[in-house]
Amino acid sequence: MDTSSTAAPAPANRGGRAARRKKTGTGARNAMLAPMVIVLAALTLYPFFANLWYSVRAVDLTQPFKQGFVGLRNFSAIVTGSGFLHSLTVTVVFVVVALALELAIGFLVSLALWRPLRGSRIFTTLLILPFGLTPVALALAWRLLFNASGGGINVLLAHLGLPSLDWTASDALALPSLIIVDIWQWTPFVVLILLAGLMALPKEAFEAAAVEGAGFWRSVFYVALPLLRPLILVVVLFRGIDLFRTFDTFWVITAGGPGNATETLNILLYRTAFQNLNFGRAAALALIMLVIVLVVSQPITKRIVAAKERR
């Protein structure tokens, strides 16, 4: 009797020790994660709130004695400025045209590689090279190719008996030239993503379509595209945001020129901050750009989530 009465509390003690070990493990995990969380917060939260603080103050280094709280005047000055609407238009045209062409070309190339062809594996490996290159080095190479006198593209045109073109010195050709550069660099990324999606599609759906008498292209439009819709939306979201923030290619090849023909919002931001030294207005422009990205990406994100839930 005495032995049974003393042994009874053992399960409770074991449960208490397990709870203490669980708490100790949770505390240890939190302690190990804390440095990373602190660093991430310092690299994200502090710059954001500092930018928010500057955006409502007059921080103009050309007028150091006229600094102070100005409310929304920086935002008003940016939006009503002469260059904002032009830069917004250039940015939208660049994003829409480049994204549409990259999706169209990328989908067609991924379809070609989807079918077993000799050498397709080698070609797929080579696709990694363009978007793996350093953007500035890539832009410098393209600037040499676009050179009006002696550039590789004009030399090729001369051999074909065609007239030379002022690729980056012409208002009409400067932006299309930059679109060509981005398509060359980032279409392979779209190809690899869509090709992976095509290879992951269930074969049963295509076999059922073949039984119904559907050919290749009908199977692509009525079977592959609907199944790839969530993945295509992800590509649109990622590439759209990446195109919107493109700066280095523009700055190295044209620097926003000729004139302001290729001045995007990023270049306007750079000039406002580091050439005009007006950090208050530059901070306001950065927040406006953030709002634009959030507003445009929100419906795309909702569609991605909805498509995932339906599956």
Image (tube, rainbow, N blue to C red):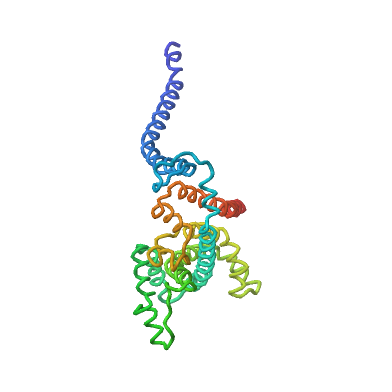
At which x and y percent is residue 287? 50, 48
Count of numbered tags: 0
In-image side of 14 versus 94 (left or right): left
Left or right relative to 100: residue 259: left
Classify 261 as above or below 73.
Answer: below
Q: Is residue 282 above or below residue 92?
A: above
Residue extending farthest top: 2
**In which quadrant of the rendered image does the C terminus lie?**
bottom right
Is residue 311 something that shows in the picture?
Answer: no
Where residue 247 appears, x then y in whole percent?
Answer: 42, 59
**Residue sitting at x 44%, y 26%:** 19
Residue 230 occupies which quadrant of the picture? bottom right
Point out the residue furthest to the right here: 212
Q: Quadrant of residue 27?
A: top left
User: Which residue is drawn at the image coordinates 46% and 39% (left, top)?
Assistant: 68
Judged from this view, the residue extending furthest toward the bottom is 161
Judge by depth and name the residue closer to the eye, 182 or 289: 289
- Residue pictured at 57% horizontal, 51% vertical: 295
Q: Eyeballing the image, is 119 above or below 264? A: below
The answer to whether 253 appears left or right of 105 in the picture is left
Is residue 4 at least partly visible in the picture?
yes
| 187 relative to 156, above or below | above
Residue 101 appears at what percent x and percent y? Answer: 52, 69
Residue in the foreground of this view, choosing between 302 and 201: 302
Q: x and y percent of residue 1 in the render?
A: 45, 11
